[in-house]
């Protein structure tokens, strides 16, 4: 396909905001706090930072590079991109097999992430409405009970899920510049402003439950390094969180990068994407949910699973002046964050059907819509049919896909870029760069620490799992 038939970014700032929108998602505000809390807080942050440098940065650079390179040949998905770079150093058949594995796995992983991610987006919208209407303000019911009531109510769950899906399909059908970029330019600045307001608010409340549990103390929970509870499983969780939050592994960063021009910068843009994401995750995500959960649930209650954001936060809004409004703001923030990431995943799958299978874009988008409904139904129905609230199936997919499978994909990507593409990758990454990636970084990280760390974490956490 000729390159000029594909869309492209309208402006540099639009591109960076779209990439930030892609990376900054529910991973930052919903998943990070609950992963950090259920993996020991301070013990989680050590492997988290190690993974950010050893895995996050090299893979972000690799994905921008794979994407821009693939885009030049008219491809926007991981399979063909892996093939194109792998054939530089491997036999065509090997390159083809690698491309097929990467493409197939990325398709499956993205679809599975969306089986629950789109429900989360639906919940955030439902909770925003419940906040503005004051539905969860009634003190006679605990916020945990409200949450359980919500996820077991088919009307709420399916109405907002479908609204989210329809909104997403419209955004994706409008294309790159008018759809994705326009939404990101509107939503991302609002998200940062909301986030800063809420972080200030949550750091300045005491605990109405126990004077010992002030929200500021909650910060200690993640900022006190604690080696004693470090395990392979928490290392896997931290590595998985880095993949999840930076959107690496599934090829969706590659997909956005495929709409670059051949000599658009890759190095500084990668660093900008990471910085914007980590600001939202550590500074905002870490200062909103964790301190509040601590203030209301205490050190022992903070580990609660996937419902953490939805259960802890409404407590604050109920007890503060203007709580309905601030609560609505918080859940809208979650909605914006999730929506701009889900657009990226939806666009990726649509590009796959459109470009790799040759089906027109609109039809492709509807096919993905149908696929989302099929994979999402069991996730929504589990609680409704079984009258449970443990979200067992949801959590299981999140753990497998969100952590393990993304790492496997990362390993394939780094093998292709660092070993099969060889030194050419360094030249390719640095092409058009405002800054140049130094050769030592390529040698020490991309050809050494990154693949080694991925293999070690995958092997040891597997052994830990089957033990
Ligand atoms: N990075 C986004 C988030 O943090 C979305 C995403 C999730 C991307 C999973 C890839 C994999 O929510």
Image: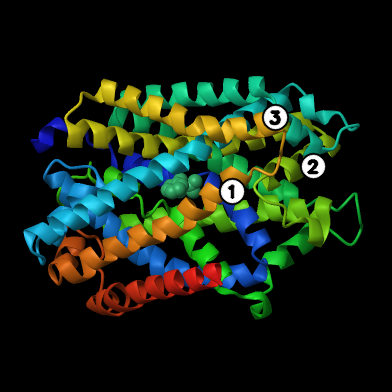
Beta carbon of the mark 1 residue lies under 8 A of ligand 1? no
- How far separated are the C-alphas under marks 1 and 2? 26 Å
Whole-percent x, y for residue 340 in the image: 45, 37
- Indicate the position of residue 94 as horizontal and vertical percent values: 13, 61
Circle 1: element type: helix
The answer to whether residue 245 is visible is no
| Residue at position x 50%, y 73% in the image | 463
Which of labels 2 and 3 is toward the front? 3
Say whether residue 367 is left or right of residue 387.
left
Which residue in the protein does label 1 denote? 395
- Look at the numbered disc 2 and give the secondary structure of its residue: helix
Residue 176 in view in this figure: yes
Tag 3 secondary structure: loop
Q: Is mark 3 within 8 Å of ligand 1?
A: no
| Neighbour tally class for label 2: few under 14, some 14-19, many 20 plus, Cα within 10 Å | many
Q: According to the image, label 2 marks what residue? A: 316
Q: Position of residue 387 (x, y in %)?
A: 72, 33
Sequence-wise first label, 1 or 2:
2
Q: Which label belongs to residue 152? A: 3
* Nearer the observer, 432 or 458: 458
Residue at image location 79% in from the left, 32% down from the top: 322
* Camera-side residue of 340 and 83: 83
Point out the image quarter for the C terminus.
Answer: bottom right
Using residue 122 as the reference point, say whether residue 365 is left or right of it. left
Q: Contact, CB < 8 Å: mark 1 with mark 3?
A: no
In the rendered image, which quarter is residue 2 located in? top left
């Amino acid at each position: 396909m000729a390159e000029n038939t594909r869309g492209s970014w309208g402006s540099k700032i639009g591109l960076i905001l779209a990439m930030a929108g892609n990376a900054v998602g529910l991973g930052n505000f919903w998943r990070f706090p609950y992963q950090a809390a259920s993996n020991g807080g301070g013990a989680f942050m050590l492997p988290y930072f190690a993974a950010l440098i050893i895995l996050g940065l090299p893979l972000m650079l690799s994905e921008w590079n794979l994407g821009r390179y693939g885009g030049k040949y008219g491809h926007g998905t991981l399979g063909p991109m892996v093939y194109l770079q792998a054939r530089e150093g491997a036999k065509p058949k090997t390159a083809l097999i690698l491309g097929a594995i990467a493409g197939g796995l990325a398709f499956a992983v993205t679809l599975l992430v969306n089986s629950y991610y789109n429900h989360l987006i639906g919940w955030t919208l439902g909770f925003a409405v419940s906040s503005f209407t004051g539905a969860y303000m009634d003190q006679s019911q605990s916020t945990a009970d409200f949450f359980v009531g919500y996820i077991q109510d088919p009307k709420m769950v399916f109405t907002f899920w479908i609204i989210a899906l329809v909104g997403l399909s419209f955004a994706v059908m409008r294309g790159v510049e008018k759809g994705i970029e326009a939404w990101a330019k509107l939503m991302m600045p609002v998200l940062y402003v909301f986030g800063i307001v809420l972080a200030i608010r949550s750091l300045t409340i005491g605990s109405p439950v126990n004077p010992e549990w002030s929200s500021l103390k909650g910060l200690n929970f993640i900022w006190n390094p604690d080696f004693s509870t470090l395990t392979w499983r928490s290392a896997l969780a931290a590595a998985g969180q880095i993949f999840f939050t930076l959107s690496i592994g599934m090829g969706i960063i590659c997909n956005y990068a495929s709409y670059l021009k051949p000599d658009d910068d890759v190095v500084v843009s990668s660093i900008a994407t990471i910085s914007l994401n980590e600001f939202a995750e550590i500074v905002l995500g870490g200062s909103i949910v964790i301190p509040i959960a601590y203030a209301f649930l205490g050190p022992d209650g903070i580990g609660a699973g996937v419902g953490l954001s939805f259960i802890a936060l409404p407590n604050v809004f109920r007890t503060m002046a203007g709580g309905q409004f601030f609560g609505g703001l918080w859940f809208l923030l979650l909605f914006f964050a999730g929506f701009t990431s889900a657009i990226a995943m939806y666009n990726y799958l649509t590009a796959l059907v459109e470009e790799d299978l040759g089906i027109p874009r609109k039809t492709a988008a509807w096919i993905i819509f149908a696929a989302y409904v099929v994979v999402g139904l069991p996730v929504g129905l589990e609680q409704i049919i079984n009258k449970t609230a443990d979200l067992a199936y949801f959590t299981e997919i999140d753990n497998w896909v969100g952590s393990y499978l993304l790492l496997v994909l990362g390993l394939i990507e780094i093998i292709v870029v660092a070993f099969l593409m060889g030194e050419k990758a360094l030249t390719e990454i640095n092409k058009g760069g405002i800054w140049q990636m130094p050769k030592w970084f390529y040698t020490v990280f991309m050809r050494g620490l990154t693949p080694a760390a991925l293999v070690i974490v995958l092997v040891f956490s597997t052994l830990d799992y089957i033990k």
